[in-house]
Image (tube, rainbow, N blue to C red):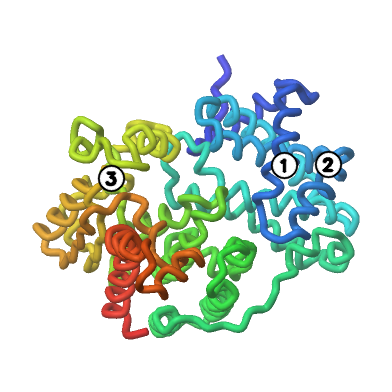
Amino acid sequence: MPSRRAHKKSRLGCQECSFTTAEQSITTFDLLDLTLMNHFTAVTALTMFSGEKQRLVWQTDIHLKARSNRVLMHGILSVAAIHLALLEPENWSQYRLRALHHHDLGVRLFNQQLANITPESAQILFPFAVMLVVWAYASPIIAQDALQLDDIFDLLELARGCKTIFFLHWDSIKHTSMASIADLVARPGAISHVALRALESMRHILLDSTYDYAISRLEHVFMRTVGRLDDVRSVVAWPCLVDEEVWKRLRVKDTEALFLFAHYAMLLERYERQWWWINGCGGNLATVLSLFASTLTPSIPLTLLLLTIPVIDQTATVETSWSSNANAPWLTPARMTWYRDMYLTNPDDSRKWTASPNLAPREVLAKSPPVWMGISECDILYDEGKAYAELLRRNGVEVECVVYPGSTHSILSLDGQSLPPSWEAINTERDHPSCEAKRCADSFVLDLGKKMVMDASEALAKAFGTF
């Protein structure tokens, strides 16, 4: 009997089996693919990057080119399938299989054509490479298990092919509509003192000149994103642009390289709420890296862990810690369970400390940096947040846990920073009949959110220096 072929496993599925299934499955496109193409054109294309030029590129130009280029067609359908897997969790399994099917076929064609790339084919392969970047960040949506560092680096390795095509064939690409992907508007930098201090601290720790360019690029990204989170291109491009030597050190989990990558994860987290395809990436990276950092020898020195209304216990249910606030608004047990099922598609992962830090060994918990935590009193996550704070204290960690009475999980959406003009007008008219109502709303809702923002800022200022 012939021996079984070796299988290369990943949390997205068995790669060898996926390729075999792709070869054996239909070679033409079916009605589900028609649904995916329609969704990409009508919805996904509008949510990948900001700006009218980018919307035109992905909604029209790439769509037209895909008619005669199978590699682009597979790229479009794979990204659309991931998007629908997020939007329609009840059909997650169906969309996951189709996303992997088109991704595998597309990557095989991409690698074949990349070996003999020409200026003409670069105009097709570059858009596909950009879609690989989107895939790399969105892939946790369809992962069977929680992604680990090696999985994340494997995906970003594939996306780094975008850099090679861009630099080698820019003369050809710059005459196409895809050139607008590099058309970034310069914004004068007004980086906060905290960010500047963090960058300077990084330079003092990473004395090896190998990291100079990567740090400069990260600072450049900070400058472009000051006060504006609507353009995600600079942020997701950073891993593709770091030097090969830095990338090699990341792959072997070099302590200094991971320290640099942790700063990138914190920047990425700022964009999660606005861009569906990176939602959860930054927070997941930051959490995994902070816990991983404490296990290294020597460990990476972390100054502060700041948590706002955090998810701590992935094993919690309405019968346990959720019970006291099971009827709280917005973040209901049903919604929280849906989020968990999307994040941890393998239920067994919920008991791993990389998913539930409250289950970490005592020796790992004891190495945690000082913690500032803000939690809402009327939130199903309230009890697990308080319990985690006490757990850290028992293990000798300095913890400041601030409870915001009467607030819900949506506290940071009600930060009192953007009041409508009508409220501002009321504020200036002391005798207005709605003045008292306005003051009550401010004190009970808006001021709570604003206070959490200010308290967190003060904690950062205390840890890293004044603003």
Q: Are marks 2 and 1 in contact (CB under 8 Å)?
A: yes
Query: What residue is shown with label 3?
Result: 356
Please tell me which residue lies in front, 181 or 127.
181
Residue ranking furthest to the top: 1
Q: Residues within 10 Å of mark 2 (few under 14, many from 20)?
A: some
Q: Position of residue 2 (x, y in %)?
A: 58, 18
Amino acid bearing label 1? Gly
Q: Position of residue 366 (x, y in %)?
A: 17, 60
Which image quadrant for residue 228?
bottom right
Query: What residue is shown with label 2?
Result: 66
* Up-down relation of residue 15 to residue 121 (above or below): above
Gap between marks 2 and 1 measured at Cα: 9 Å
Q: Residues within 10 Å of mark 3 (few under 14, many from 20)?
A: some
Gap between marks 3 and 1 measured at Cα: 34 Å
Q: Element type at marker 1?
A: helix
The quarter in which the C terminus is drawn is: bottom left
Q: Position of residue 344 (x, y in %)?
A: 40, 37
The label number, if any, that marks residue 104 in the structure image: none
Horizontally, residue 88 falls left or right of residue 285, namely right
Q: Element type at marker 3?
A: loop
Horizontally, residue 210 falls left or right of residue 395, namely right
Query: What residue is shown with label 1?
Result: 75
Q: Earlier in the sequence, mark 3 or mark 2?
A: 2
* Up-down relation of residue 266 to residue 224 (above or below): above
Horizontally, residue 58 falls left or right of residue 307, namely right
Amino acid bearing label 2? Ala
Q: Residues within 10 Å of mark 1 (few under 14, many from 20)?
A: many
Residue at 56%, 46% in the rendered image:
138
Q: Are marks 3 and 1 in contact (CB under 8 Å)?
A: no
Residue at 75%, 35% in the rendered image:
37
Q: Earlier in the sequence, mark 2 or mark 1?
A: 2
